[in-house]
Amino acid sequence: MTPATLRATDSSAIGTLNETSLHAALKTWYTQPGDELEVRVNGYVIDIVRGDQLVEIQTRNFSALKEKLTKLTTQFQVHLVHPIPREKWILRIGANGRKQIGRRKSPKRGCVEHLFSELVSFPQLAVQPNLSIEVLLTQEEEVWKDDGKGSWRRKRWSISDHRLLNVLRSIVFTTRSDYQNLLPPSLPREFTTDDLKESLGITQRLAGKMAYCLREMGAINKIGKRRNAYLYTKNLEKES
């Protein structure tokens, strides 16, 4: 990258004003010696620049990145890092943000397939040659504040922060085949989203998103219907 294209910012505060604890911790965990942080590239602030590679850390809301990634991947190698909490603890604090009221482990467990809940925003872009995606399975702490401003489902407790406790595993996706490898060997040659749900132990909603993304990527083909369900098969054609 030439100096005209890539310019370091004058202030390390750019891009960090609304940064969550989780995002900041992941950036620290991921950074290596020689990396540049918070660099402007073609008008966009990039979390980490590592040589000729741009590294973006996105904890959620991939839709907000679609335009940015679409433009940057026409010129640069972009690596998107996304954490999924394999294990999570709920920390309850008082309205003042200081007093700890309680802590418990959440029964919810994340899995790599939860990536497809975000990839529905740009499944075709995910297999673009200049974009790679890395999923980090983590242990996290979710902080609930007793401020009366949260969802009724949490009895008005608001989620004030997410904190990184540990990184358990990393899975990198660079090609269509990498995503195909998430299809379990037990899956029938012709399958529905019900089969995906049962084979992977995921929800019907997530199975639907996974099937949609894989189809848009060219990883699976829609070949018909079985009763009211679409029928799919794995795309065995070699990648171009």
Image (cartoon, rainbow, N blue to C red):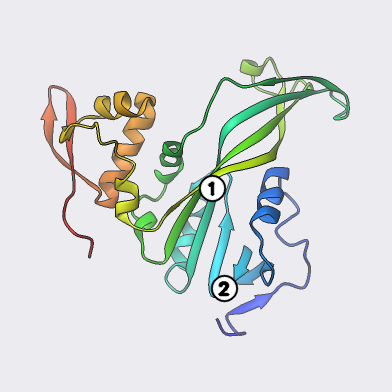
Q: Looking at the picture, which amino acid does disc 1 mark?
A: His
Q: Which residue is drawn at 78% across and 21% down?
A: 146
Tell me the crowding category of disc 1: few under 14, some 14 to 19, or many 20 or more residues within 10 angstroms, Cα based: many
Tell me the crowding category of disc 2: few under 14, some 14 to 19, or many 20 or more residues within 10 angstroms, Cα based: some
Q: Find residue 50 and report its horizontal and vertical position in percent.
A: 59, 70
Q: Mark 2 points at which residue?
A: 42
Locate residue 13 relative to residue 220 in the image: left or right: right
Q: Residue at x 88, y 29 (%)?
A: 98
Q: Find residue 40 and report its horizontal and vertical position in percent.
A: 64, 70
Quarter of the picture containing the C terminus is bottom left
Q: Residue at x 72, y 72 (%)?
A: 9
Vertical placement of 151 versus 115: above or below?
A: above
Q: Looking at the picture, which amino acid does disc 2 mark?
A: Asn
Q: Can residue 44 be seen in this view?
A: no
Please identify, in this view, whether the residue under mark 1 or under mark 2 is nearer the observer: 1
Vertical placement of 184 versus 119: above or below?
A: above
- Tell which circle, 1 or 2, labels the residue nearer the N-terminal end: 2
Quarter of the picture containing the N terminus is bottom right
Q: Mark 1 points at which residue?
A: 82
